[in-house]
Image (cartoon, helix red, strand yellow):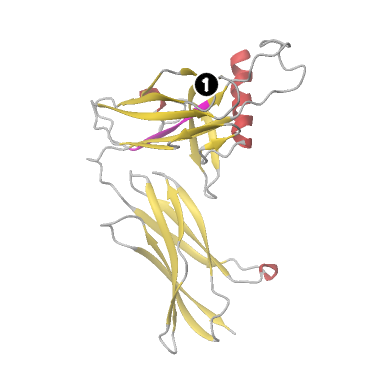
Amino acid sequence: MKTLLNYFLLLTVLCLTQLNETFSQGFEVAPVIMEFNAEPSSSQTKTLTITNYFNTRRSFNMNLGDFNRNEKGEKSFDKAGKNNFSCANWITVSPSFVEVNPNESKEVKVTMSVPTGENKTKWCMLYVRAAKPQSAFGADKGFSGGMVISPTIGVQIYQSPNSNNNFKAALSDLKEISKSEDGHRRLSVFVENQGEKNLKCKMYLLIANLQTAEETKTPITSFPLLPGGAKIAELNIPKDLASGTYSVAAILDYGKGHDLEGIQTEITVQ
């Protein structure tokens, strides 16, 4: 029961902590994204650095878990190894518990050991948690005095061998989703990762006036997309378009050396 309570406490902490930042309430972790490219039947080790900015010596412990993203890009969290995309069981953290003096740093080794035949992209989260200093109430008095939240940073871990080159993305369902209260027009497009690699997507609109052939390119929107994942991307139409009919193409660039994906519609500006 205590383990289960600790797990739900950790999830609460993650909801309150910005997992993509290196600094959290008195300590720093670098890097916050670790990308491994070990081939099947091999291992690869990287270094994680923890820096203590508290004014006292603090203890830090490391735990693994799973995460995923929904179509809105929001993360959800789960126990380590529960999902079929998880690489949590392939990871060894040494040491998994460290003590760091104020304004000092310590290194932790993170080793990825890939089993034979496992050439797909996998991912998980490594949680670095600052232990709460011992108080007069003791460490095991339960939750009767209220829940104590310890600052936590999540490190995203990805494993994808270089020999796996299955990059593939698709676009569909381009439509206008403008609302009168928004003050501007907006399109949405469904983006799907149909391959086996983590995609670093860049999207923009290419807008062509069908009467004058004048083209406008909108600012780039960037987002990651995990294998098997999907996202509803939203793109703004510029407010300063002249009256007329326009061809609007949503363009997806998901990596050097890969063809651009596109989907097209028409709009009328009054």
> Up-down: is 97 above or below 76?
above
Instruction: Name the residue that disc number 1 marks.
Output: 101
Q: Residue furthest bottom?
A: 211
Could you say which is closer to the camera, residue 115 or residue 30? Answer: 30
Q: Residue at x 28, y 25 (%)?
A: 115
Which secondary structure lies at badge 1? Answer: loop
Q: Residue at x 60, y 21 (%)?
A: 56
113 left or right, relative to 88:
left
> Up-down: is 195 above or below 29?
below
- Residue 110: horizontal and vertical position, in percent? 37, 26
Q: Is residue 1 visible?
A: no
Circle 1 residues within 10 Å: few <14, some 14–19, many ≥20:
some
Circle 1: residue type = Asn
Q: Residue at x 29, y 56 (%)?
A: 256
Residue 264: quadrant of the picture:
bottom left
Q: Which residues are magenta?
A: 121-128
Q: Residue at x 25, y 41 (%)?
A: 164
